[in-house]
Amino acid sequence: MDFLKDIFKDIIDKLNTALIVEGRWKMLLGGLGNTLVIAFFALIIGVILGIIVAVIKVAASMNKKSKILAVLDFLSNIYINLIRGTPVVVQLMIMYYVILVSTTNSVLVAIISFGLNSGAYVAEIMRAGIQAVDKGQTEAGRSLGLSSLVTMKEIVLPQAIKNILPALANEFITLLKETSIAGYVAISDLTKAGDRIRYSTYDPFTALLIVAGIYLVLVLGLARLFSMLERRLRRSENR
Amino acid sequence: MKTDNITNGEVLIKTIGLHKSFGSNHVLKGIDEEILKGEKVVIIGPSGSGKSTFLRSLNLLEEPSAGEIWFDGECITDRKCNVDRVRTKMGMVFQHFNLFPHLTIRRNITLAPVKLGLMDEEAANANADRLLIRVGLLEKAESYPGQLSGGQKQRIAIVRSLAMNPKVMLFDEPTSALDPEMVGEVLDVMKELANEGMTMVVVTHEMGFAREVGTRILFMDEGIILEQNTPKEFFANPRQKRTIEFLSKVL
Ligand SMILES: Nc1ncnc2c1ncn2[C@@H]1O[C@H](COP(=O)(O)OP(=O)(O)OP(=O)(O)O)[C@@H](O)[C@H]1O
Ligand SMILES: [Mg+2]
């Protein structure tokens, strides 16, 4: 029994040092706040950008004659290839040290950088989801006299959502975890806060475990949210 | 009986010098054809001869590479022509039904009339009920396509097109994807439609249907209409060598 008591006391001690002493929990909380702010706003930018690029790509593939769409499609491809072809850390540092070097708000830089990154992946997820819907569906809609816009909205997109949602959930989870590199550009995010605690307590195990635990809770919560959404979608159709 | 309801030789569809290429593949090689109101034109021919492409050109699902298509006195290949409006008057039935899986049967039928503002929700529903009764599927109104058999799906697909009150119905191998025991129920609906005077253009391998319901057979081969005749003449006295070859395989 004494043995267990010792272990328990040891754990409490370590947690106390990592969290309570010198108000270290405030550092963690601040880091968590930054992580959530970066992930949330990057997500919004990513989704908006992703939708725009996906619409361009789908429209260009349906309407091969339009010159404007062809140019936009070309630019979209450059964007997607640049983003997917380079590591996100490098993108973040280029943004911080080169493109937005005059900006002092590093959180804003991170939001823009992660948003741009996510947009490319969201675009590809949406494009693939839309194009996976059987061509016959579009043909049936058009042959009834529906415009391409109405056909897209009423027939294709409702079916595409089901292809898109699971991949999108993955992308959001990846994005949340990827923000852990924000420390590279001097942002105190959750990971960085954990680092600081690690240095000042000389106890890497506890600090890292706490940080990992918080990420895990966030990710599991997000995954749960999405599976609920998917289930609701499935229930409302296709019985 | 067959030719009775061809309304005094009025042209409904006319193609002039119709060509279609997919890249370097020249599929339709100049088709000049007239389809009269009330006709039931059956198109047959070997695989890859361009039957589907020709049919799908008529409602511009395939855009012709050259030539003109006239429908109901209007040149629909003209740039200024509103293709969406024209299509509301041309029903099309596909080999693979293409029902909308995320919508109920009722909604499959009412979507287009309502979205296009041709009917309000209530009128569209009443119209759907009337059509569903006609094909004996009223009790499926609230079901989803995934819950129906192939034959039922195709009858619904026909009904969905009919809900637009089309002037012509185009069928692309409507029974080819069906289990044999379900072919009859779909052909019956088509026969009924024919008897009511609907103008029909049907691509099919059902020679029985062609003989019984068709008023004219077009035989397509390598992108042209090689031979055409009344069903009786066509099957009794095929003239072209390729036609004879084809018929010997399918009859
Ligand atoms: N969307 C397309 N893109 C490229 N080639 C096509 C397309 N649609 C048809 N083709 C080609 O056009 C030719 C004629 O095809 P089509 O489908 O009209 O033949 P079909 O007479 O309907 O044959 P089947 O009896 O097999 O249905 C074929 O060589 C086919 O490969
Ligand atoms: Mg075909």
Image: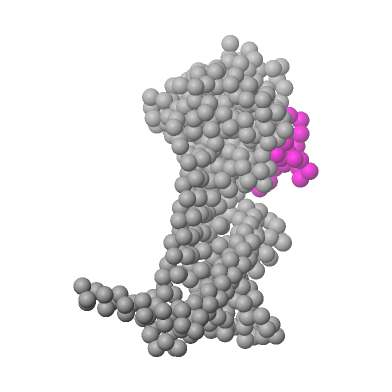
In the image, residue B230 above or below residue A140: above
Relative depth, front residue between B209 and B107? B107
**What residue appears at the point 76 percent right and 45 percent down from the top-left corner?**
B79
Relative depth, front residue between A180 and B4? A180
Classify the position of the C terminus of chain B by image quarter: top left
Question: Where, by quadrant of the figure, is residue A19 drawn?
Answer: bottom left
Q: Position of residue B64 (x, y in %)?
A: 65, 45
Q: Position of residue B153 (x, y in %)?
A: 48, 30
Badge count: 0
Relative depth, front residue between A1 and A64? A1
Question: Where, by quadrant of the figure, is residue A97 drawn?
Answer: bottom right
Question: Where, by quadrant of the figure, is residue B225 drawn?
Answer: top right
- A50 left or right, relative to B185: right
Furthest residue to the front? A2
Classify the position of the N terminus of chain B by image quarter: top right
In the image, residue B235 above or below residue A117: above
Numbered range of the magenta stretch = B63-87
Q: Position of residue A86 (x, y in %)?
A: 52, 77
| Observer able to see residue A87 | no
Q: Is residue B86 magenta?
A: yes
**What residue appears at the point 58 percent right and 66 percent down from the top-left corner?**
A40
Q: Position of residue A107 (x, y in %)?
A: 62, 77
Q: Is residue B51 magenta?
A: no
**What residue appears at the point 76 percent right and 40 percent down from the top-left corner?**
B81
Here the colouring is one colour
Furthest residue to the right? B80
- B79 left or right, relative to A239: right
| Observer able to see residue A49 | yes
**What residue appears at the point 64 percent right and 85 percent down from the top-left corner?**
A98
Furthest residue to the top? B1
Relative depth, front residue between A110 and A154? A110
